[in-house]
Amino acid sequence: MLTGADDGALPRSLSSDELCAAARLAGFAPLPLFAAGWAPEEIGVAGAVAVRGLLARGLAVVREAPDGPGLTPAVRAALEPLLDPDTVVEVVRDEGPAGRRHHVLGEAGDRLVLAAERMPSIWSLQAVAEPAGSVVRTIADPLISGGVAALASRSLTVSARALSRAEALLAQDGAAGLARMLQGHGLEPADAEALAVLLRSARVLVTVRTAHRLDSGARSADAVTWLDAGSAGLWLVTPAEPAGDPDGDDAGPHDEAYTLTAAGQETVRDALAGLLGTADPKEERCLTS
């Protein structure tokens, strides 16, 4: 269970539009992961409605200055880890038996705020006192299935186009044609059959992404993704070298590809620890004090 830090100025919940509007009012570019998916011609209206909501709730005020409304100083300070973070970590569980889950942890200085998407585009906010790595592990560890172990050292590489078409086939009750379609995308028959079994068994896809602000102001990003394929085991998903895809006129010469590697629980946890950094001195101080 996460320990909340006392911050009375932090709103208990905000919509994606309100978080984006709050960032603009504070003079920051909104984090892309909070984008609500509006069409370009709709963004202005959605932003105006969000600003009105912030004003109505007392989170923003109309200033006499010509640059218009702004967040109250206390709200701006409380929200800064989500508006202009030094580090941001995103945990996404795609649709599965228990539904979609999406968490965003922002860190600015020594302050951390966790946003949890409880319903589409509505985020519950909580200031947390634990180190960032502990918070992320608390969220992600229950998503690392303890079920059947996948076949050791087995790996399968497939194009993103093939995975997209496999998803469409499964949605159309076309599981019987999966292996044949995968062979058409360059997989050997044995690999195509193994991947077809894996995709038919897939239950949950989890991605943990990190982005750290560099001294230059740019952000460095990395991610760990794993697939819980139920009876077919756990699989780490990593980008592979681009490969050609012999699939007719629409096949590009450099299709994105992914390698799925059989993994046990500890392998996934080790990959997650490597992503989060186990030698974070700030975290070690908290854990040993």
Image (cartoon, helix red, strand yellow):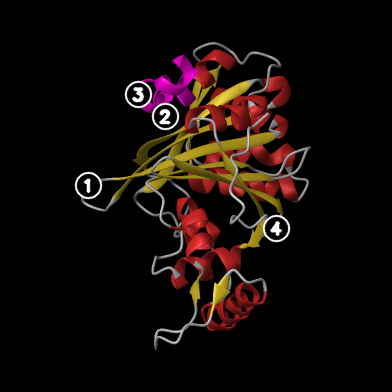
Q: Residues within 10 Å of mark 2 (few under 14, many from 20)?
A: some
- What amino acid type should be assigned to the residue bearing mark 4? Pro
Q: Residues within 10 Å of mark 4 (few under 14, many from 20)?
A: few
Residue 179 figure quarter: top right
- What amino acid type should be assigned to the residue bearing mark 2? Leu
Q: Residues within 10 Å of mark 1 (few under 14, many from 20)?
A: few
Question: From the viewer's perspective, is the residue at label 4 or at label 1 nearer?
Answer: 1
Q: Residue 287: say if magenta.
A: yes
Secondary structure mostly seen in magenta is helix
Secondary structure type for disc 2: helix
State left or right for residue 163 relative to residue 171: left
Q: Residues within 10 Å of mark 3 (few under 14, many from 20)?
A: few
Q: At x 67% / y 22%, what residue is drawn?
A: 145
Disc 4 designates what residue? 120
Number of callouts in the render? 4
Question: From the viewer's perspective, is the residue at label 4 or at label 3 nearer?
Answer: 3
Disc 1 designates what residue? 215
Secondary structure type for disc 3: helix
Q: Nearer the viewer, residue 123 or 93?
A: 123
Disc 2 designates what residue? 275
Residue 92 figure quarter: top right
Q: Gap in Å between the C-alphas at discs 4 and 3?
A: 36 Å
